[in-house]
Amino acid sequence: MREFRPGETAVRRDVFGRKVWGAHALWVVEGTTEALVVGCRPGAELLVPTTWIEWLRTGDETARLRALPNLADGNWLLGRWTWRSTAHLQWVPPDTWFSVNAFFEATGEGRLTHWYVNFQQPMRRTPIGFDTFDLLLDLVVAPDLSRMEWKDEDEYAHGRRLGVVSEDDHRAVERAREEAVAMIREAVGPFSVDRGLGNWRPEPHWPDPQLPADVVTLG
């Protein structure tokens, strides 16, 4: 699998049942044995379920609630969307059941607004980036690591009932919860001040990342 250079586009795809559930075009910020670090600013291209687009445009909560049953049934449609409002950095280590995301103001000084631990299947490198699958559970963390709050636990439980989150997934997530919380409490890995991810700024000359035409084609 080829290595990506900083500034190139790498596509994160969420894949369920051999079908793309979502795709996000991102810049490669760095790639090391520790992690692949990717990011974007407003303007990056996405493919997302049309129920999610409907919810964002209308605020209709029933549209969002249709997403999980559609996912479980393998019955969803994708639509084009553009990343908005924030700059976004993802730290995605190999063989790990979570990524660490940093969200920044898209204007002004680009202040770090919060960290976000996204529990997901370990990444699988592809010729266009990497594939994973979002396991619905998240942990929101204050910029200074002083507070953390679990998010979407009801949705995670519903995903388990529907079979979207398997028992093997669940056991791995339980272990990953402990690992992520320990990293936060000890301020290590991506949370380390010395690591510097909380001070990231998008490169102004990099063009907005775009999705390739064959993004939904799985190898």
Image: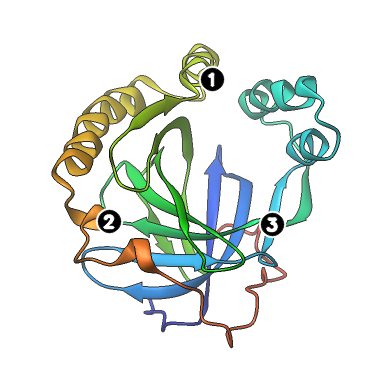
Indicate the quadrant where residue 162 lies: top right
Kind of residue at badge 2: Pro
Q: In this view, does 96 lie to the left or right of 129?
A: left
- Residue 59: % across, % down: 80, 30
Q: Can residue 219 be seen in this view?
A: no
In the rendering, which numbered label is found on residue 142? none
Residue drawn at 65 percent across, 63 percent down: 215
Residue drawn at 48 percent across, 42 percent down: 133
Q: Bin the neighbour count of mark 3 within 10 Å (Cα to Cα): few under 14, some 14-19, many 20 and up.
A: some
In the rendering, which numbered label is found on residue 84? 3
Q: How is the image coloured?
A: rainbow
| Disc on the earlier residue, 2 or 1 | 2
Q: In which quarter of the image is the N terminus?
A: bottom left
The residue to which callout 1 is attached is 155
| Disc on the earlier residue, 3 or 2 | 3
Q: Under tag 1, what secondary structure? A: helix
Kind of residue at badge 3: Arg
Kind of residue at badge 1: Glu
Cα distance between the residues tagged 2 and 1: 26 Å
The residue to which callout 2 is attached is 94
Q: Which of marks 2 and 1 is in front?
A: 1
Q: Which of 141 and 169 is in front in this view?
A: 141
Mark 3 in CB contact with mark 1 (< 8 angstroms):
no
Q: In this view, does 40 lie to the left or right of 118?
A: right
